[in-house]
Image (cartoon, helix red, strand yellow):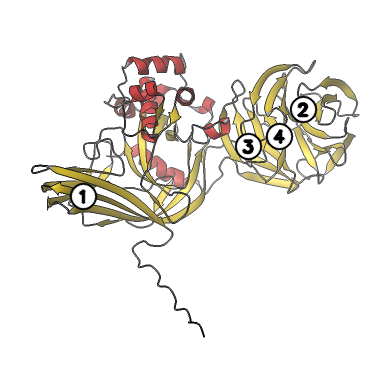
Amino acid sequence: MRDRCTLVAASILVAAFAGAAPGQVVREIAAPGRTCTGLAWDGKLLWVADHGADELRGVDPQSGQIRRTLKSPGFRPAGLAWDGEQLWNVDVLEAKLYRIRPGDGVVTRTVPAPVKVPRALAWDGSALWLGDDDGRTIHRVDPSDGTTIREIGFPSKSADGLAWDGRYLWVADRLSDKLYALWPDSGEVIATLPAPGPHTSGLACDGQHLIGVDYQTDRVSWIKRDDQEHLIRRRPREEWVLFSHQLRNLGPDPLPTVELFLALPEDLITQELLGDPTLTPRPTEFRTDPWGQRVARFHVENVAAGATASAQLKAKLRAWDVRWVIYPDQVKPLSWIPVDVRKRYLADAPKFDLKNPIITAAVKEAVGSERNPYWIARKIYRHLHQKMHYERIGGWDVAPKVLARGAGSCSEYSYVYIALCRAAGLPARYVGSLVVRRDAASFDDVYHRWVEIYLPPYGWVPVDPSRGDKKTEAGRADSFGHVTNDFLITTHSGGGSPLLDWNYNASERYTCAGRCRVDVEGIAEWSPEDPGLPPPQPSAQPGPR
């Protein structure tokens, strides 16, 4: 049966959504001006740069009252940072960094910015982080002379605010309306939170919360960065889906027996079935495979040439966009993974071929000596995106062949990712689904498969290697620990089910009395209305007079 711990955890997580979650705005105050940009926290006052008034304002975080006002050193003040003793301010027009004594506003140091169009600013305890709008890069800067120590790219479209939380560099992107936590060594996106407004122009951290000032709403918001609840679930979407799986006997001889198998969906953290699915015709029996996947079996006899055998599943569901917020330092060692999970989901299978030299060499190159389960998964994820590109070549080849070829479908990306994770000691399995293709009324005959990895203590976490093969760090990270609301997940499997084989959603088997050609078609019809209802009749239109 399905892992009991997974089902119990899903129930607990659903109940927990009544509480707080990362990204939630816990309180707000009015901004101290209409043209606020940079933001910094000095432990007592929240400093806000206003480029319309050319001022730096120290604000009481409780009342929102302005307690101190300093003239900005330049005429386009932007990013602000606090180094433990004094303020730093970047001026866009002057392209300079100013260190300012907050007691009297005296500039104690002026440093040339190493970039053409500087804007966002943060302090990490020993150096400044500075965003360059022209080069779309973020620089770690020596505060003594302004030289670049390290350079990483923008995670996505823009970098309008920067903040350091003691471990990660946070970036406010007003164009994507997201807050990104970056691993400072590589620029990889670790976590993604919704921005508190449509134009978050400044960002700070008070040690517990992120603080953002929004240029459009003129609000200062305190944002929950972390919590015991690690899921962001939003954008519920209701749809009907009618999935049909049909086998045609093209002849010339009959098929004595045909068996059709439909994977049965269930309630998950990403989806809720609004009523029991309808199966047509009535299944011969229900069975559960060794991976815990429930399957409806349909048995048909004597399918003549030209005849068909078919099975349908109709369901109404509510699907959510769900994002896992997981920080690497909070992930426990591999030894925390339950023994039964390791035994089942580290096993080899023909599609994986874990001892193949191509797989072992790739694991060594990608993972090295890494032992943190999170970083094992991320390094393999990065390795795939460096070595592969998406291409539906046809067929589902074994992982070593796909990796050597450097191209594959979503299923083949999944096989490679599972093989590398298992070979590195990280349990992995795959998920199969039906997909809403953009419009609410649409059809899907391609489907989609991705991976789940086991990260202690969080449990199964989704990773979509093919969807994550994007150009930007934010684009790649968006498919690590994130499931959108356009799926009906039907299948969970470790690979090679005795009922579904290596298929997902559906499968079939048949016998042939002589010579037979068989055609199999599967299609999912999506609709906002019940697809079993008759189509609306056109209203009568009056004729010409």
Q: Disc 2 marks which residue? A: 82
Identify which residue is drawn at 83% across, 34% down: 77
For the residue pair 318 and 474, the one nearer the viewer reads as 474
Q: Disc 3 marks which residue? A: 179
**Mark 3, secondary structure of its residue:** strand
Name the residue type under label 1: Arg
Task: Locate residue 247, reporting x and y percent.
Answer: 22, 49
Rounded to the nearest angstrom, the CA distance separating label 2 from label 1 is: 71 Å
Q: Which mark is residue 161?
A: 4
Name the residue type under label 2: Trp
Left or right, residue 536 beside residue 312: right
Left or right, residue 171 beside residue 266: right
Identify which residue is drawn at 34% across, 23% down: 401
Q: Earlier in the sequence, mark 1 or mark 4?
A: 4
Name the residue type under label 4: Gly
Residue at the limit of the structure toward the left, as seen here: 513
For the residue pair 424 and 300, the one nearer the viewer reads as 300
Q: Residues within 10 Å of mark 2 (few under 14, many from 20)?
A: many
Is any part of residue 426 visible from this angle? no
Query: In front of the other: label 2 or label 3?
Result: 3
Q: Which mark is residue 488?
A: none
Q: Residues within 10 Å of mark 1 (few under 14, many from 20)?
A: some
Q: Earlier in the sequence, mark 4 or mark 2?
A: 2
**Mark 2, secondary structure of its residue:** strand
Q: Disc 1 marks which residue? A: 248
Name the residue type under label 3: Leu
Query: In front of the other: label 4 or label 2?
Result: 4
Residue at the limit of the structure toward the bottom, as seen here: 545
Task: Locate residue 388, reporting x and y percent.
Answer: 44, 26
Q: Earlier in the sequence, mark 3 or mark 1?
A: 3
Q: Earlier in the sequence, mark 3 or mark 4?
A: 4
